[in-house]
Amino acid sequence: MPQPASVLAPILAQADDGGSNILGLLLPLLIIGGLFYIMLYLPRRRAAKRAEQLSAAITIGDDIRTIGGIYGTVSSEDDETYTIDLGGGNSMRIAKKAVAERVGDDTE
């Protein structure tokens, strides 16, 4: 009668080979997936968080710059838009998402 270790040895060897093949296929995919997450998703999430904080911090009377480079002072606020005073009696309505930054008094 053969010993149990000698009977199971070929089966365990095949299981080890199959396991390493699966690991060999999945490991590069996991690494690439992790890199995509780090390089694409995290920066977008951080930028969205900064934009949300900026939008929450802007109040009427703040000087702002839009993503198009237009400077103005917030004169009123709606759910989705700001009305900004451009000076000289001109005003413009812009989307809240179009605000790039709040301009401070020390930068002028």
Image (spheres, grey):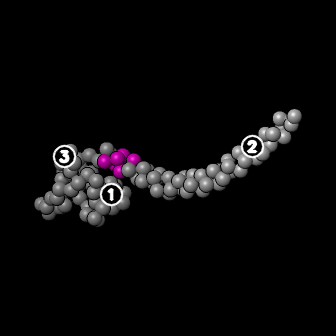
Tag 2: amino acid: Ile
First reached walking from the N terminus: tag 1 or tag 3: 3
Label 3 SS? loop
- What residue range appears in magenta? 49-55
At a point 25% along the width and 63% down the height, the residue shown is 70
Q: Residue furthest bottom?
A: 69
Is residue 36 left or right of 1 when viewed as pictured?
left
Residue 11 visible: yes
Query: Residue under circle 1?
Result: 100
Give the label, 1 or 2, closer to the camera: 2
Q: Main secondary structure of the magenta part?
A: helix
Where residue 42 sits in the image (x, y, percent)?
Answer: 47, 51
Label 1 SS? strand
At a point 50% along the width and 56% down the height, the residue shown is 36
Q: CA distance from mark 3 to mark 2?
A: 70 Å
Image quadrant occupied by the C terminus: bottom left
At a point 33% along the width and 56% down the height, the residue shown is 101
Of 80 and 53, nearer the camera is 80
Residue 60 painted magenta: no
Q: Evaluate if marks 1 and 3 touch, with contact meaning CB atoms under 8 Å apart.
A: no
Is residue 22 left or right of 96 when viewed as pictured?
right
Q: Which mark is residue 11?
A: 2
Tag 1: amino acid: Ala
Q: CA distance from mark 1 to mark 3?
A: 18 Å
Label 2 SS? helix
Q: Which mark is residue 78?
A: 3
Of 39 and 101, nearer the camera is 39
At a point 16% along the width and 58% down the height, the residue shown is 92
First reached walking from the N terminus: tag 3 or tag 2: 2
Q: CA distance from mark 1 to mark 2?
A: 64 Å
Location of residue 8 (image quadrant): top right
